[in-house]
Image (tube, rainbow, N blue to C red):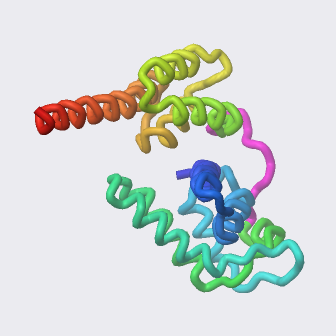
């Protein structure tokens, strides 16, 4: 899992807190900042970079990481029943790396761990456009459970000329928690979540009807 993908997932976690009328804990905000230092790295790679730090100097720009380790463990426990062992392993490894640190200075981490902030070269795997991913993700989540609305959102996603394979793969991961390698496979996983919900509702309604009868 890329750091940018985990950061996107945390944004949805923030949304859940705000939906309940509250604000996300500072640990969530700090975790997003930490992941933003090296969005192109995998979570496992970030953990290895943090292992190279022996001490981080203080300053106004430092990121407190004391509670992020515990947050990682909670995220791992949430993902474990969903059948995501590689992701769970990465997050727990990151937690172990953070456990010995109190603060991280972005400049120290960049310099000492030699994290490149330069744009990816043309031959490297491109990072999906998070703005497009979030736009379609919101539409899908809002329409989930509404057959007509979801079909409309799905068609708009399917025919969007601005989306590439990476965006479809990212959407499938965020919306359906599924790893895919192509546009067609990603679309199938996205549609499958909607279909599973509609089928579940139909079965529940049928059961309720039999009980009432």
* Membership of 117 in magenta stretch: yes
Q: Residue furthest front?
A: 213
Query: Where residue 145 appears, x then y in whole percent?
Result: 42, 31
Q: Can residue 3 be seen in the rendering of this structure? A: no
Which one is in front, 199 or 112?
Answer: 199
Residue 194 in the image: state x and y as whole percent.
39, 30
Residue 38 relative to residue 205: left or right: right
Question: Camera-side residue: 52 or 16?
Answer: 16
The residue at 54%/62% (across/down) is 44
User: Looking at the rendering, which quadrant does residue 138 occupy?
Assistant: top right
Residue 118's place in the image compared with 189, above or below, is below
Tell me which corner region of the image, top left, top right, bottom left or bottom right, holds residue 113. bottom right
User: For the view shown, which residue lies furthest in the right direction?
Assistant: 60
User: What x and y, as percent, mark residue 177?
Assistant: 43, 44
Locate the C terminus and report the quarter of the image it occupies. top left
Q: Position of residue 33 (x, y in %)?
A: 73, 62
Residue at (23% x, 37% y) in the render: 204
Q: Residue at the spot x=57%, y=54% of the render?
A: 16
**Residue at point 29%, 34% (across, down):** 201
Classify residue 129 as left or right of residue 174.
right
Can residue 52 be spotted in the picture?
yes
Q: Range of the magenta residues?
A: 114-125
Please indicate whether residue 186 sits to the left or right of residue 192 in the image: right
Front one among 44 and 77: 77
Asked if residue 105 lies left or right of residue 142, the reply is: right
State the count of labels: 0
Residue 81 is one of the magenta-drawn residues = no
Query: Could you tell me what secondary structure mostly forms the magenta stretch?
Result: loop
């Amino acid at each position: 899992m890329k750091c940018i993908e985990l950061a996107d997932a945390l944004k949805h976690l923030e949304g859940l807190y705000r939906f309940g009328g509250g604000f996300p804990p500072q640990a969530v905000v700090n975790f997003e900042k930490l992941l933003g230092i090296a969005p192109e790295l995998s979570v496992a790679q970030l953990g290895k970079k943090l292992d190279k730090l022996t001490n981080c100097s203080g300053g106004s720009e430092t990121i407190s990481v004391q509670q992020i380790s515990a947050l990682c463990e909670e995220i791992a426990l949430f993902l474990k029943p969903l059948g995501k062992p590689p992701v769970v392993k990465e997050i727990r490894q990151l937690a172990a790396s953070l456990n010995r640190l109190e603060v991280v200075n972005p400049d120290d981490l960049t310099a000492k761990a030699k994290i490149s902030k330069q744009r990816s070269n043309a031959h490297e795997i491109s990072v999906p456009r998070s703005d497009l991913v979030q736009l379609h993700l919101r539409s899908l989540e809002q329409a989930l459970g509404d057959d007509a609305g979801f079909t409309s959102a799905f068609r708009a996603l399917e025919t969007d000329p601005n989306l590439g394979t990476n965006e479809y793969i990212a959407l499938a991961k965020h919306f359906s928690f599924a790893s895919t390698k192509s546009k067609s496979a990603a679309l199938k996983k996205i549609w499958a979540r909607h279909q599973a919900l509609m089928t579940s509702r139909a079965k529940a309604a049928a059961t309720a009807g039999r009980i009432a009868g």
